[in-house]
Image (tube, rainbow, N blue to C red):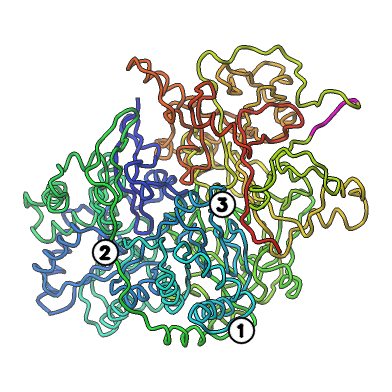
Amino acid sequence: MPNYYATSYFDGADFASVLVKTREGRPIKIEPNPAANELGKTSARVQAGVLSLYDNDKVKQPALNGKDETFDKVDDYVLKALADAQAAGKKIVLLSHSYPSPTFKKLFAEFKAKYPTAELVTYDAVPHASALDAAEEVFGQRVLPVYDLSTTELVVSFQADFLGDYNGGSLETSYAVAKKPGANMLRHIQVESNMSLTGANADERIRLKPSATYKLLAEVYNGLNGISVSGDAAKIVKELQEKGNKAVVFAEGSKAAYVLAHLINQKLGSNAFTGRANLLKEFNGARYNEFLSWMNAGQVGVLISNNVNPIYSSNKGEDFKKLLAKVPHLVAVVDKKNEMYQAAKVVIPVAHWLESWADLTPQSGVYSLMQPTITKVFKPRQIEESLLVWINGKNSENNNYYNYLKASAASFLGGVSFNKALYNGINGAVAQEVATTEEGAEAEAPVVRKGGNLSYAGGNAAQALADLGAFKASDLELVLYTNTAVGDGTQANNPWLQELPDPITRLSWDNYLTISPKDAEKFGIENTLNARMQLDGSRVNLAVNGVTLKDVPVFIQPGQADGTVGLALGYGKKDSGKVAETGVNAYPLFDGYNLAVANAKIEKVSGMHEFAGMQLQNTLMGRYDIAKEVPLETFLNVKFDDRTIVNGQPKGWNIPLEYHTLTDSTPAGKISLWDEFDDTDGPHFNLSIDLNSCTGCGACIIACQAENNVPVVGKEEIRMSRDMYWLRIDRYYSAKEKITTKEQLDRGLDVPGVYDILIDPAENPDVIFQPVMCQHCNHAPCETVCPVAATSHGKQGQNQMAYNRCIGTRYCANNCPYKVRRFNWFTYNLNDKFDYNMNNDLGRMVLNPDVVVRTRGVMEKCSMCIQMTQATILEAKKEGRTIKDGEFQTACSKACSTGAMTFGDMNDKSSKVRELYNSDRRYTLLEEIGTKPNVFYHTKVRNRKEK
């Protein structure tokens, strides 16, 4: 049986309070920590964090002058270098990513007491500098304000990807709560250039250049302060005034944009503002520039870099590399043999967060602990252990960081025992009254939710308006961003994340320039399907402010604002592992303060780039019953099954299609060719998926991959449509024109122009996400065609696979209308071509022993995580109790931070899944063909003002 440990995920970029599932001393799966509410939710990057522990490309032991060495000799060298620097009056600088650890800061204070010339400087690849500067002006503190959208009825966002990495993340949970259909349902207006994850979920989306977005934001501010405005600004101002304190405005970009958004929220009295502070980002641009001046003047004697790499992630990386030559001693605490490793005199392997002790304060009033869940895999050492050695000497009995942390934590725990806090993983303002830290076990959390201490204290609106006006429009403007997979590049060598398709473009193993269809035509950019139905695209040279990136692939993106291009950060890392070099490095174009850059230029070059696309169709092509949506007004005022005919269509918004074999015969969906069996004895599992709550983030995909040993196949296989994911999230755009089923029948799809209207996305399309896995049909087409009964139906509702019976005919995949079965073209774990994680001893440590690793020639698919449901049943039997609703979980439902997926027992009449089954919004995929799935969906409701 597994053991679960509560700990904190923190890698310098992302934070989450998590539970780590271990088997035989091996961490194999990351789970959300329910004790921590929104701070306990897991993103795709958090879910994939366990694989980074087993990275064979990591630095494995310390080095001195380019040769592997012992810690004993490394510490001798560093201690002498520190003493020499101190004696010479040179500065000793610890350059670290943001690290909100009170015990680390206390330890550094002791280090500074030992070496008075020591300085702590923060450097982040994506520093949130403008947001912090704005917060300092408005709130008097360099922190990020925390928001809660659960009671908000209107959100207007200007370039802010608040369902992504904006403001430190964690808004998706309260957003989903507010999006529950009803009279007070949240309305979301997004103003942006790129098609972001947040924009894709918006009810209304306005495409604008960054310069025009800033202008609109300024007009909205002026409109709320009595100045006459028109157009989109007037409409937004009216809605904000109507909603008052139930509205909130977000903005991203320059400091001025953040300042105006804060001042608008202050004027509205927005209830979304909690007063709590997000403490995860600590960068200070003035302080960092001062550090650079020290280096340039030769004032730094020792530089200790804590897992940061400005050579890669700074827009002046080459200049930083030259400055390093002026530093006599560089001590690089690194995880890869990257540029900092190569420049260092001393190298210390960084400890993975699953190997480390630490404490963190991610928010005001929250104290979170990190504990190791495995003995150190190689010979790393976390920065705190090194500081203790350099303070106390090599052989001091005070060099045990666990003891140091335990003593320090007492001052933050308010009388709560260290062991109890460690068991919970989190302590403070966001903790729930009851927290589950292992299956079936409950732990009382010491403090319930309370408010924070942030308040509005200033803000120069006139200066902000002037600064926004200074961002002049240009013919082509670049918007840089971080995506849901690779983020800022911290985990760029993680193959799970590289293969995870972008939720919008559905491409993997790449970053690329996104461009609007209109601009693509203007610049001669093409995206074409070759004879094998593989996507290829043009390449360009991208020039911004004297910096040129060559051979950048270009993807034509519906919804991209004309006159703009977008490019993801975090790719193109050198010497950082076998998959980290994927893509191009966009950091040379990023000044660290504003993700929008004016005066971009592109020049098409010869050659075509090969994209790895997992979804080549963009629209539903008129088949609206697959991913259903309905306007809020219709949802509230029209009965879902109203069959009154209006313009040739029923008024009801959730009436299933019916196919008939003969005129007036029974619909095909109600015909059964099999004898029914009694499924009321024991559990009968169903999975509910709410399209209103699914944001398309992809956390469920990685959770499924980790739980079920799904292999990584690489770019070449993805291009051949051989991905192995058991779960996919289809993304559909609205077409250029919506044509009703009756119109299609009347006009015929063969009429010139009709098919193009249905297949081509609109210039500014609506987007809908739909997770699709095996539907576990009660009348499963796959079961009847298997010649060896390798796939069969279980009494609990699952469609089951017997891998040792499968002979690989693939008849089942051919007969599956949902296209969710995956064929093993290779034995991925034994084939050197797929050198990702399964075919080496270290990478195989992440495999789940409860799930068999499949071999070549075998079909596989979603099992509805039968190993998890059986474990729940067995645990309840051992304890002699009934199973509570919510205990049954699958990997995807457990990982979903928005509650879009609900799993449970339909035979439990009080279960949540049974309640959801009775919803008016409930429907099943392809209901008309009579497969009777055990997975059902809920119609998306879009809160849009009728034009």
Query: In the picture, which quadrant includes the N terminus?
Result: top left
The answer to whether 404 is drawn above or below residue 681 in the figure is below
Residue type highlighted by circle 3: Ala
Which one is in front, 193 or 588? 193
Q: Residue at x 22, y 42 (%)?
A: 422
List the residue tagged with mark 1.
474
| Image quadrant in which you'd find residue 200 | bottom right
User: Left of 383 or right of it: where is 484?
Assistant: right
- The x, y position of residue 791, in whole percent, is 64, 21
Specify few, some or many for label 1: CA neighbours under 10 Å numbering under 14, 14-19, or 20 or more. some
Query: In front: mark 2 or mark 3?
Result: 3
3D distance between C-alphas at marks 1 and 2: 41 Å
Residue 72, magenta (yes or no): no
Query: In front: mark 1 or mark 3?
Result: 3
Residue type highlighted by circle 1: Ser
Q: Residue at x 87, y 26 (%)?
A: 661
Which one is in front, 187 or 594? 187
3D distance between C-alphas at marks 2 and 3: 33 Å
- The x, y position of residue 188, in whole percent, is 56, 60
The answer to whether 346 is drawn above or below residue 657 in the figure is below
Query: In front: mark 1 or mark 2?
Result: 2
Residue 660, magenta (yes or no): yes
Q: Residue at x 93, y 53 (%)?
A: 751
List the residue tagged with mark 2.
453
- Looking at the rendered structure, the secondary structure element under dot 1 is loop
User: Magenta segment, which residues?
Assistant: 658-662
Lower sequence index among marks 2 and 3: 3
Residue type highlighted by circle 2: Asn
- Mark 1 near mark 3, Cβ–Cβ under 8 Å? no
Residue 183 bears which disc, if any?
A: 3
